Image (tube, rainbow, N blue to C red):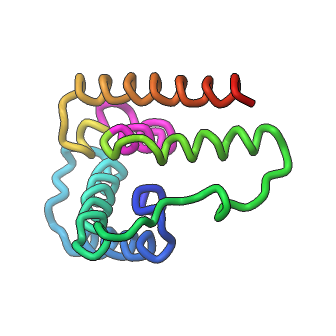
Amino acid sequence: MCYAMPRDEELSKDAVQETLNMYQTMDAFRDECSEKTYLMRIAVYSCRDIRRSAWLRHMDRRVTVENLPETSSQAEMESVELTLSIMRLPKQLQEVTILYYYQNMTIREVVQALNVSPSTVSKRLNHAQAKLHAWLKGRKSCG
C-alpha cells in the first residue's frame, strides 16, 4: 500500500516508516476491526499526508513506462499494463482497488480502513472496474 500510493521509492519508505511509527505509538486499537485493517487505515492516511505535502504538489512523480523493467512474457506485460492502469485511476478508486484486490481485504475491512460506507466502497470498486475494463479493452483493440 505504501509503495503503490506515493509511487516513489523514497516517499514509499517514508510512508512505511511513518505508518510503523504511528502504529507503535498509538493506543487507539480497540479490537473494532482486525489489526491488518487498522494498519492499512494508518497506511492510507500516512500516504495521503505525504501526497498532500506542499512541495510534492508541484512535482510530477508518476511512474512512466520507461522506468519499468523489461518484461519477458505476455502475462507479465499484461500485469504491467494493469498496474499502470490502476495508477491512472483517481486516488479514491485506486485506494479501494489496491486494498480489495492486492491486500485481499473484505469490503467490510476496506470500509473500516477508509472510513466510508459499504455502498461507497462498492460503487468505487464498480467504477474502477469499468474504467480499467474500458482502458485495457481500448489498448488491446489498438494493438
User: For this view, does 68 lie left or right of residue 50?
Assistant: right
Check the image and name the residue furthest to the right.
72
- On screen, 126 above or below 94? above
Residue 99 location in percent, x, y? Answer: 41, 43
Q: Quadrant of the C terminus?
A: top right
When the figure is inspected, residue 40 is found, relative to residue 114, above or below; the finding is below
The structure residue drawn at horizontal position 23% and vertical position 41%, both measured from the top left corner, is 112
Find residue 107 and report its horizontal and vertical position in percent. Answer: 34, 30
Would residue 119 be counted in the magenta stretch? no
- Would residue 72 appear left or right of 37 to someone viewing this image? right
Horizontal side of residue 115 vs 40, given as left or right: left
Q: Total of numbered circles in the picture?
A: 0
Residue placed furthest toward the front: 142
- Whole-percent x and y of residue 53? 24, 71
Question: Which image quadrant is residue 90 in?
Answer: top left
The residue sitting at 24% across, 64% down in the picture is 52
Q: Main secondary structure of the magenta part?
A: helix
Magenta residue span? 93-109
Query: Horizontal and vertical percent for residue 32?
Result: 19, 44
Q: Nearer the viewer, residue 39 or 88?
A: 88
Image quarter hosting the N terminus: bottom left
Nearest the eye: 66 or 92: 66
Q: Residue at 25% of width from left, 36% of height from top?
A: 111
Residue name at image x 46 percent, y 77 percent: 10
